[in-house]
Amino acid sequence: MSRSRKMIEALDREIEQKKARRSDLMQKAKEEERRAETRRKIIYGGAFFAYLATLSPENERRVKAAIDAMIKNQRDRQFLGLSDE
């Protein structure tokens, strides 16, 4: 096998290794983004419930009803104990 052919094969192997590494890093980045999004939702949810606790009972019912109306997924509504729309 010629020297040039060996170099080509070595570069091909290196390319495949780099592609595999890139794929792994892309998957890791996607997972990190998903975790960050989940954390943001939990933090905002906790802040929302803390905000509700500061409202008068009437305002709390009004705000909660407005938020409840935004939940459209039937399975989510059932889980939260909300009535069917």
Image: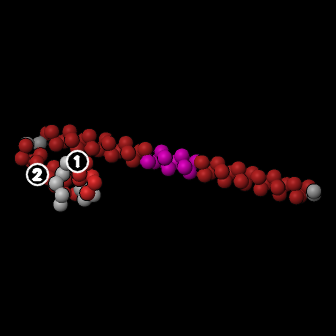
In which quadrant of the rendered view does residue 4 lie? bottom right
Position of 71 with respect to 14 (left or right) is: left
Do the numbered discs 2 and 1 sit on residues whose CB atoms are within 8 Å? Answer: no
Residue at image location 58% in from the left, 48% down from the top: 25
Q: Main secondary structure of the magenta part?
A: helix
* Whole-number angstrom distance, CA of label 2 to CA of label 1: 17 Å
Front tag of 2 and 1: 1
Residue extending farthest right: 2
In magenta stretch: residue 27 = yes
Magenta-tinted stretch: 25-34
Pointer 1 residue: 80
Residue 62 marker: 2
In magenta stretch: residue 23 = no
Residue 15 marker: none
Residue at image location 60% in from the left, 48% down from the top: 24
* Front-lying residue, 50 or 16: 16
